[in-house]
Amino acid sequence: MCTEDKKPLFRDLTAEDPDPEVTEIESLCVNCYANGITRLLLTRIPHYKNVVIMSFSCEQCGFENNEIQPGGSYAELGVRWKLRVEDPIDLNRQVVKSDYTAVRIPELDFEIPAQSQKGEVTTVEGIITRAIAGLTQDQEVRRQQHPEEAAQIEQFIERLQTLKNGGSWVLELEDISGNCFVENPQAPAKDPRCERTDFKRTKEQNHVLGVFSQDEVNPLPNTLTPCDPSQASYDQLVSDEVLQFRTNCPDCNAPADTNMKLTKIPHFKEVVIMATVCEACGHRTNEVKSGGGVEDQGVRFEVRVATKEDFSRDILKSETCNMLIPELDLEVGGRALGGRFSTAEGLVRATLEQIKDAPTLQGDTPSLVSKDNLERFIEKLQEVLDGKRSITLILDDPAGNSYVQNLNDDPAAYDDGLKVTRYDRTFEQNDELGLNDIKTENYEES
């Protein structure tokens, strides 16, 4: 339950909070097998995420150990990164790896399996350096006991060393938890040498993360209750009813209330609007979910934004919808802004606010992203909001669950500021939406 002063569970380490809540647990020392003390601190890394800092110390032998674990939930989808290392600057890209990140270098047939290393914030060069250090660790013993294997490992270490000396090669990262990231030196422009792909986890991968469906936990039929949103059915949400259930704040993890309501968008479909307000930290979230399934075709909208009337155009952007502004060379993934029902002005302003909060502009951490380029880009976005620069807003939704308002009174009439294109999805797009898995399951059952 929330305390009376409603403090967030994950708080910033500041001078205003000189006495952070530290939990101490008596635990076994793995070095001398005496009892030591493990201290747990729940805190936040600015512009990143909530973390749990764990520190162990043993008074008997002096052994100490420190570790950081993510304090947030797993992402809804897994993620794959494919980086083509072609320039020395690529070796300095920052990489965030979780415990579930698998690393592969196809050119060397080399793989670091998931859960074989602890999560860390490193660089591309740091990944290679750590791999070399791990292979070199017991080389002296191998040279005496297994000289042939030691020689083979030595040759492989030399091949790893050549990766840092230049040339072109590929680094692949796969993380079923979705907590993996590769820095883009060209941000906010699209990365020319790195590709990101989201994928739906299999049942086995969910079990590795400790994620189980309600049917697996409790196979008995359940009825809808306000405290169990996973059982919610859109049919049980009448138009004038707001369903409220308890959840945790996505920012500080304190208990909060989420309101959910079914709304009909004229000339489109029903959507579910969800809003969360946290009384502990003041964080607010607004999210829109489609009330139906995936459409038969994807949809692409091209919207001209040049006048005040264009800014007031209603737009429903689903979480699978990518947003592009060709004039600014900007591409925003579907989950960057999330699902939201807003206007053209609202989408541009939300993009501006997210870029302003980028870690590159806030901290003094070394980064490959140029602060000057981001500041100039922010100025261009501000010119768009001020009406000094016209743009074309492109919304591409493979799921077909996005909508852009026709400014004419007759929705069937032609709107010269709006172009709508329907298209058939590719196999890769179906895979990201999880449709290929459904087809495979139906085929196996038949």
Image (cartoon, rainbow, N blue to C red):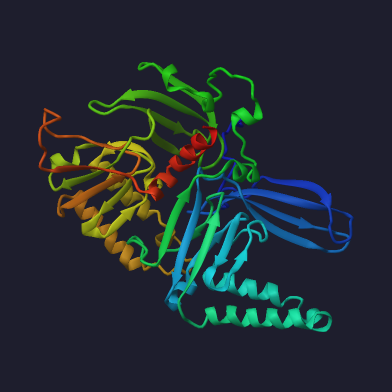
Which percent across, then down, holds residue 185? Answer: 40, 67
Q: Quadrant of residue 264?
A: top left
Q: Residue at x 13, y 39 (%)?
A: 309
Say which quadrant the N terminus sits in.
top right
Q: Residue at x 60, y 42 (%)?
A: 206
- Between 184 and 311, which is closer to the camera in this rendering? 184
Which percent across, then down, holds residue 179? Answer: 54, 52
Compared to 88, does 349 lie above or below? above
Compared to 272, does 52 lie above or below? below
Q: Is residue 376 visible?
A: yes
Q: Is residue 121 visible?
A: no
Q: Residue at x 87, y 63 (%)?
A: 61
Question: On the picture, is 152 further left or further right than 169?
Answer: right
Question: On the picture, is 340 further left or further right than 388?
Answer: right
Q: Residue at x 27, y 46 (%)?
A: 395
- Between 87 and 243, which is closer to the camera in this rendering? 87
Q: Quadrant of residue 222?
A: top right
Q: How many marks?
A: 0
Compared to 246, does 163 lie above or below? below
Which percent across, then down, holds residue 40? Answer: 70, 49
Question: On the picture, is 267 further left or further right than 335?
Answer: left
Which percent across, then down, holds residue 307? Answer: 12, 45
Question: On the picture, is 60 further left or further right than 196?
Answer: right
